[in-house]
């Protein structure tokens, strides 16, 4: 159908993520540090993303596109914190002080996150970054418990995170759809040693079985004091 839909100029985009944060329908993601319209049928055409773009990279165009489907568009969970100008959640002086402290020199401190969003509940099932991806499914605590998480686990992988104790529902169905609908090359699960993290591991195991695909996979367990246990 012919309808109004957003258009993103990659040359103007600086990858700040403000548009993805403003989109309530999950239509925009950050892929390779650039904003992308993930699927036409996720975009409602209302343009909440336009006024927040600092570079004017987002405009409207009228073209042939799938109709907006509110039933499948992933709704963004609202944050109670007021975001900063960069699109990050609010912070305080102690957080800034810790962030500016020098990191251990033996760690690769560069970010290895190649896409946005990364929360399991928010990622679209058919996002383009899943195609031919080595998938890392991690408990969100693991990145804080293990110091070199980016350098050792996230590098060259698509990372999605969650907490089976805090998130509502079972991840198995979504993991199954991601594996079924995309060419996933491998799956790595990083979990904490605590019992509740078993829900994340079990969800991946069930998804691999239900997908009907034979994919290499492994589980890495992190101790609460930051050691790799297996």
Image: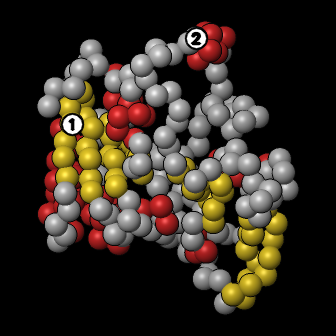
Residue furthest bottom as drawn = 1
Which residue position holds label 1? 220
Q: Residue placed at 19% from the left, 57% from the top?
A: 216
Q: Earlier in the sequence, mark 2 or mark 1?
A: 2
Instruction: Let me know if residue 22 appears in the view.
Output: no
Q: Is residue 105 above or below residue 110?
A: above
Q: Where residue 61 appears, x then y in whole percent?
A: 80, 76
Q: Quadrant of residue 183?
A: bottom left
In this view, 182 is above or below 99 = below
On screen, residue 68 versus residue 156, left or right, reads right
- Left or right: 72 as drawn, with respect to 136: right
Picture layout, residue 66 above or below residue 16: below
Q: Does dot 1 land on a helix, a strand or a loop?
A: strand
Residue under pointer 2? 101
- For label 1, the crowd category at 10 Å Cα-Cα, with few meaning under 14, some 14 to 19 and many 20 or more, is some
Name the residue at 62% across, 81% down.
67
Q: Position of residue 199 (x, y in %)?
A: 21, 42
Query: Residue at the spot x=29%, y=70% of the render?
Result: 180
Query: Residue 201 location, x and y as percent?
Result: 20, 44
Determine the secondary structure under disc 2.
Answer: loop
Q: CA distance from mark 2 to mark 1?
A: 29 Å
Residue 8 position in % (x across, y down) = 74, 65
Question: Which disc number belongs to residue 153?
Answer: none
Looking at the picture, tell me which residue is in the foreground, 182 or 132.
132
């Amino acid at each position: 159908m012919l309808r109004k839909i957003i258009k993103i100029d990659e040359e103007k985009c600086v990858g700040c993520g403000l548009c993805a944060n403003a989109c309530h329908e999950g239509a925009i993601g950050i892929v390779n540090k650039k904003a992308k319209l993930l699927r036409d049928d996720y975009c409602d055409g209302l343009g909440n993303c336009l006024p927040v773009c600092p570079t004017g990279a987002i405009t409207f165009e009228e073209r042939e596109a799938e109709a907006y489907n509110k039933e499948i568009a992933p709704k963004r969970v609202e944050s109670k914190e007021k975001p900063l100008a960069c699109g990050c959640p609010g912070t305080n002086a102690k957080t800034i002080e810790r962030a500016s402290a020098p990191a251990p020199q033996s760690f690769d401190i560069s970010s290895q996150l190649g896409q946005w969003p990364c929360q399991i509940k928010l990622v679209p099932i058919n996002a383009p970054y899943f195609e031919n991806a080595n998938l890392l499914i991690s408990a969100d605590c693991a990145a804080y418990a293990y110091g070199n998480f980016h350098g050792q686990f996230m590098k060259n992988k698509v990372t999605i995170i969650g907490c089976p104790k805090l998130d509502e529902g079972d991840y198995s169905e979504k993991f199954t759809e991601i594996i079924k609908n995309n060419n996933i090359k491998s799956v790595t699960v990083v979990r904490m040693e605590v019992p509740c993290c078993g829900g994340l591991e079990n969800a991946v195991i069930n998804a691999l079985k239900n997908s009907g695909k034979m994919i290499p996979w492994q589980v890495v367990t992190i101790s609460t004091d930051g050691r790799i246990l297996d």
